[in-house]
Every structure is written in structure tokens, then in C-alpha cells.
Image: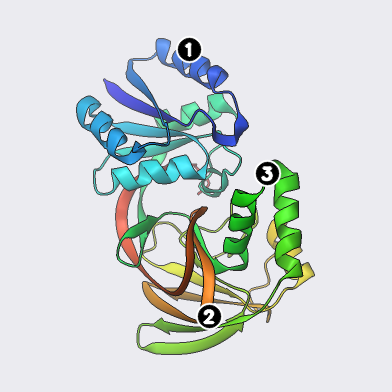
Amino acid sequence: MNKILFVINPISGDKDKTEYIKQIDEWAEGLELSIEKWETTGEADEEKLNQCIEAFVPDTVVAVGGDGTVMLCAKVLIDKGISLGILPAGSANGMATDIGFPEALPDALDLILNGRTIAADMLLFNGKDYGLHISDVGLNAGLVKEFEEGERRGFLGYAKGVTSQLLNLEKFEATLKIGDKTVVEEGHMVAFANARRYGTGAVLNTIGKLDDGIFEVYVLRSLSIPGLAGQFFEHIDDAASYCEVYQASKVKVTLNEPRFFQIDGELMGETKEVSVEVIPGCLKLIVGDDY
């Protein structure tokens, strides 16, 4: 019998999860499934989820929430051989969108049961913090800070953060050591992309794959309104001068001054140095047919 653990974030996306739970129960009724539901509380979630998995021993864990809930599950499932699926239910569902999970709950549940899996990579930052999606230093991390500290959520909170960041926009210098190669860049952001798409829907690059054993280092050299608009509409000019993309399995970035740093939407504070390496094939991830 297939055993599935649903990890539910009750406050993600400011959405009531009652309907999600009802549909999950109805879906499982007519199938030969053993399911458990476990809710996050924000207190020692990683440790408690580990204990729940050890007790229930599921074949699949499903994150019911946004990118933060996905990241929680991914960290716990590293090298466990247990499949990870997603029911998109957050304010930011960039990871689910990137790997082809449908927003409609019945379709997402069907994919969890019948979808294929890949051996996905994860990223390790500074030897201790894991990431699955997209992390960065500079402009976007500053936006994450503004959003966390602001009183507004949703589009208005995002717009306020963008306005504040643009009014105080400054370039910084970054030295990138990629293998035996060292390059010096100047710009507004350095991103580390295991995937292709931010939670906002913006496409950061067109070449990223979660299971290719490498990641992309994206440098935003200057602001380009047509270029940034193109990222939302998936019209990326790979030869554009406003950005540069490097591929790496390991990189060390040194900044000339401290900048804010975020991992998959979680603010890590200010830093002048970030080291990143890929952990290949460590996560069994369910993906859509078109991924």
C-alpha cells in the first residue's frame, strides 16, 4: 500500500487549508492509500517532521504550501529515497510552477500518484545551509528584507518593496571564483539558480535543470526594463549585456561591501562572502510530464 504524508503549512499564502484537507481525504478514500497529515507550527518543524517520517515511513511526502514548505520537506528528505511532491498553496509557488505541478488540486493529486520522478540536485551554502530553488545576494535579497519587515502582503507589499529598493539602488563589485577561473563583475545582484523561475513567475534563465549536476550563477549587471519585462513573459535574450550567466558545480563569491543574502526566500542577513556547491542527485522529486 502506498503511504503518503501530507505536510501542511496552515498559514501559507494566507489561504484556509480546510478545503485542501477535505479534497485530500475524498481523493484518498477510493484509493488503496495510507495517508497521514502533519501541520507545521514554526517551532522546531524540521526536527518534528523528521520524527514523523521515522514513525510513519512514507513512500511519498507532499508539501502543501509555498516555496518555504517545499524547502522544509526537501531538507528533511535529502538522501532518504522518499519522493517529494507539491500541492501549490502558498503566496509564492515558483518551485511548483518550474517543475510542472498544476495549480488545480485534483490535477496535482493525480500527478503525485502517477507522475515521474527525477534525482534532483540541491545547493549547499557556506558548508551548512541547503537550497533547492533560487538564492541571491543584492537586489532581490533586499526586496525579501523589505517584504519581511513591511506590514502589507501580496502585490501591494511587493510593489512597496520594489519601490524602496529602486530608490536606493547601488551597484557593488563581486569577485567570482569558478573552478580555476576568477572573474570580477559589477552589478546589482548575484543569484545562484538550481531552478529557472522565481516565486513571482519571473524566469531567471532558460538553461537551468534541477538534475544536471550544475547550477547557474546569474549576475544582474544593470537594470533593463525591456530585459526584466522579458523575464516575466519568458522572452530571454541570452546575449543581453545587462546580465551574465555562468554555469558551475562550485563557486565562491566575494563582495567589496556587505549585501543582504537570501536562500529560497529566507533572509540570512548581510554578508561579504558566499560559497556554493552542488549536491547532485540527492532528492527524489516528482515532476510534471513536460519538465
Q: Where is residue 130 shown, x and y percent of the image?
A: 36, 56
Distance from label 1 to label 3 (Cα)?
37 Å
> Does 183 appear above or below 135?
below
Q: Quick check: 202 left or right of 129? A: right
Location of the N terminus by quadrant is top left
User: Callout 2: helix, strand or loop?
Assistant: strand
Element class at badge 1: helix
Residue on which the image places disc 3: 151
List x then y, in percent, for residue 23: 52, 17
Q: Which amino acid does label 1 sit on?
A: Glu
Residue 26's tag is 1
Task: Tell me which label, 1 or 3, sits earlier in the chain.
Answer: 1
* Residue type, numbered disc 3: Glu
**Quick check: can you spot residue 212?**
yes
Q: How far apart are marks 2 and 3 (CA)?
A: 29 Å
Residue 287 at least partly seen: no
Q: Which of 68 and 286 is in front in this view?
A: 68
Say which residue label 2 marks: 257
Give percent across and percent down for residue 167. 76, 68
Q: Nearer the viewer, residue 70 or 160?
A: 160
The crowding category of the residue bearing disc 1, from other C-alpha atoms within 10 Å (few below 14, some 14 to 19, many at least 20), is few
Could you tell me which residue is drawn at 71 percent across and 47 percent down?
157
Of pointers 1 and 2, the one earlier in the residue sequence: 1
Q: Which amino acid does label 2 sit on?
A: Glu
> What's the residue at 63%, 59% (across, down)?
143
Q: In this view, does 33 lie to the left or right of 261?
A: left
